[in-house]
Every structure is written in structure tokens, then in C-alpha cells.
Amino acid sequence: MDWGPVLLSFEIAAFATFFAAILGVAVAALLANFRFFGRDLVEVLFTAPLVMPPTVLGYYVLVVLGRRSFLGRAFEELSGTSIVFTKVGAVVAAVIGALPLVVKSVRTALEETDPTLVLAARTLGATAFRAFLTIQLPLACRGIAAALMLAFARSMGDFGVTFMVAGDIPGETQTAALAIYDAIQAQREEDAKLTIAIVTGIVIVLLYIVGKLTTRERRT
């Protein structure tokens, strides 16, 4: 068995989880703590990838970040490489799949924190941002950790958007999900079964930990 696709999936999932955490926590905090015009639209936009077909999402990414787009050309001029059909594209695809899970889960965790503690901090002179960092965020840490594990698991298993945006290039963008597809297409069932078993085991462990974290959070 070639461990390259599995290790690449780990690498892409780690980067994707990192970027999804930064953007997702910020958006979740905005949605949980503020009322503003267009709030519902922002929520819809960040939730849509959960239900949209991967081919539709992949098309949008190609339009926005492809080599013919402004962002794609600007990135290529700065970095010397394109976004599509590279490892960067695979990370972008994984972020798109993971971000809705982070936003929804973290928002729920933030909204379930005791608002009186945040108000108490504000009355003692803390700014809204400081109260968020020192009170609300620590109280929601279990829910945030669970959200990031879900994001990691989702990033490892992405197929459709990754295939459209990053392609299926062995040694470059071929993740475990794509390697399984290729192995089945080539009738290499033993390789496919082993990779499937590894990915399934990782996902089950992550979901078990997520269950423990969220159960403890409810009990507290």
C-alpha cells in the first residue's frame, strides 16, 4: 500500500482545519453576538456548502480562483504557482467543506455560554473583545474543539470539490479519498480496502472524541 495519499490527506486536513478555525470562529462569533443587516444572508452563505453538490461548489471555486480569474492571476504572480490543480487548491477545497461545520458548531457553543458572565465582565470595564477572549471563548472551548475535530474529519474525506479544483495527481494532490476511487476503478480491491479501513478508523476515533466532548459540555 502507498501511504502517500493518507499522509497527504493528514497534511491537507491539518492546514484546512487551521484556516477554517480562524475564519469559522470569527464568523461564528459575529453571528452569535451581533445583530446586523444581512446577518441571515451571511449565515446562509456559510451554510450552503453543506447542501450544495460538490460539482457546483467546485465550479464556483474555479470561477473565483481559477487561472483566468483576478484572484487566481494575482496569486500566481505573487507565488509563481496557480491555485487550481495544486496542493493549495486541495486545501481550499477542504476548507470549503469544513467551514460550515465550524461556523455552525462554534456558534452553538458560543450561544450556550452563560451571558451573565460576559455582562459581568463588561460591567467591570472589559471591552466586548476582551470579554469574548477571556470569558466566552474559554467557556466554549469544548464545543470549539469538537467543531475542529469534525472539520478535520470532513477535510480528510473530501472528494468532489477536491477532484474538481485540485485534480487527481499522484504525489501532488491525490488524497486518500481519490486514491480509493482510483484503486476501485483499477480493480485493486486490496489497496482500496486497506485505505478505507484506515480512513474509517480515523473518522470513528474523531467522532468518538467529539461525542465525549459534547456530552461533557452538556453535563456541565
Image (cartoon, grey):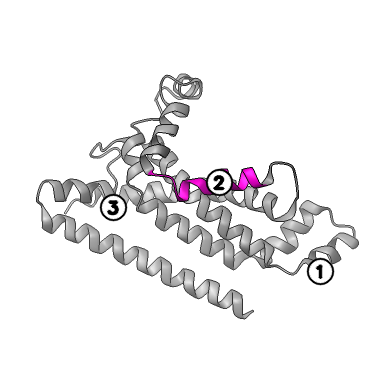
Residue 50 sits inside the magenta stretch: yes
Q: Which residue is mark 2?
A: 46
Q: Secondary structure at mark 2?
A: helix
Q: Position of residue 140 (x, y in %)?
A: 64, 65
Q: Which residue is mark 1?
A: 116
Q: Is residue 136 visible?
A: yes
Residue at the spot 40% in from the left edge and 38% down from the top edge: 56
- Report the amino acid beneath label 3: Val
As drawn, 5 above or below 68: below
Tell me how far mark 1 sits from mark 2, CA to CA.
29 Å
- The crowding category of the residue bearing disc 1, from other C-alpha atoms within 10 Å (few below 14, some 14 to 19, many at least 20), is few
Tell me how far mark 1 sits from mark 3, CA to CA.
46 Å
Q: Which portion, as a residue range, is magenta?
A: 40-53
Q: Secondary structure at mark 1?
A: helix
As drawn, 72 above or below 169: above
- The crowding category of the residue bearing disc 2, from other C-alpha atoms within 10 Å (few below 14, some 14 to 19, many at least 20), is some
Q: Residue furthest bottom?
A: 219
Tell me which label, 1 or 2, sits earlier in the chain.
Answer: 2
- Report the amino acid beneath label 1: Thr
Q: Which residue is mark 3?
A: 6
- Report the amino acid beneath label 2: Phe
Q: Position of residue 98 (x, y in %)?
A: 47, 50
- The crowding category of the residue bearing disc 3, from other C-alpha atoms within 10 Å (few below 14, some 14 to 19, many at least 20), is some
